[in-house]
Amino acid sequence: MKIQREISLPTAGGVRLHGELHLARRAPAVAIFVHGSGTTRHDPQNALVAQHLQREGLGTLLVDLLEDHETRDRHNVFDVAMQAQRLVDIVRWLRAIEPGCESLPLGYFGTGVGAGVALVAAARAPELVQAIVARGGRPDTALDWLPRVSAPTLFIADAAGIVPDWVSAAFQACTAEKERVFVASPSHLYKEPEAIAAVAQHAGRWFARHLLRATSRSALEG
């Protein structure tokens, strides 16, 4: 049986956020997608990556961390700390309420500003996440938090331009197990079919290595 539905997620601040959950009955782990400015949970690039992970058996949750009216205020869009707290609230809700998610290993896949959001959330609540993929974007917005990130982190960078400089700063500051890979994207937004396919392959590889390893460790400890 597979759960595939839109869900409404409460946060501590009283805001209700919306997400799209795909969860097979025996999914070994769940990847939570955190997008950047100008996109929503329906972003086609993230949807393609999510579909790739679903085919590999992972559950996925694509979530909006801002209500529609909040996205019109640029301060909200770039408020990494606020969105990170909402992500933590969502993960705790998922573990407490959604059947089958109580103890599943979780990963974050962050793009754009969402890369920084995912890293800050991982630093604030390290017990909630077992692996992170930061695709381009602005992971450098989490520089002050990166020494507190303990989850293995994959940084995906463009092959040219200013974007790798942002990723490089975050990669250097990260003290957890880490890897950096380069995926060429002339748009710098990974919209090209070859670019998004490569991103999906790298994300699948990273989550398979670290989330499935966490699943095996939990089974042994149980």
Image (cartoon, rainbow, N blue to C red):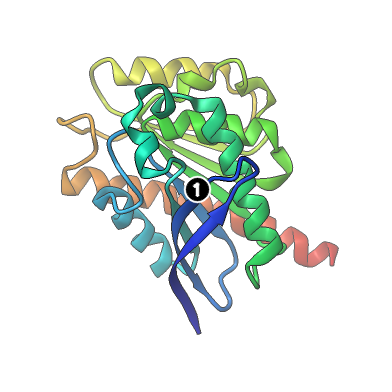
Q: Few, some or many C-alpha atoms within 10 Å of disc 1 (few <14, some 14-19, many ≥20)?
A: many
Q: Is residue 95 above or below residue 90?
A: below
Nearest the viewer among 54 and 101 is 101
* Residue 175 figure quarter: top right
- Can the viewer see residue 48? yes
* Left or right: 48 as drawn, with respect to 15: left
* Residue 104 figure quarter: bottom right
Counting the numbered discs, the total is 1
Q: Is residue 17 above or below residue 99?
A: above
Which residue corresponds to mark 1?
206
* Left or right: 124 as drawn, with respect to 157: right
| Three-letter residue code for mark 1 | Trp
Q: Is residue 114 above or below residue 214?
A: above
- Give x and y (percent) for residue 21: 46, 64
Nearest the viewer among 95 and 200 is 95
- Can the viewer see residue 36? no
Which quarter of the rendered picture does the C terminus lie within? bottom right
Identify the residue shown where x is 50% and y is 85%.
Answer: 1
* Left or right: 215 as drawn, with respect to 69: right
Of all residues shown, which one is farthest toward the bottom? Answer: 1
Element on which disc 1 rests? helix
Identify the residue shown where x is 57% and y is 17%.
Answer: 173
- Give x and y (percent) for residue 106: 60, 53
Identify the residue shown where x is 34% and y is 54%.
Answer: 49
- Give x and y (percent) for residue 116: 48, 28
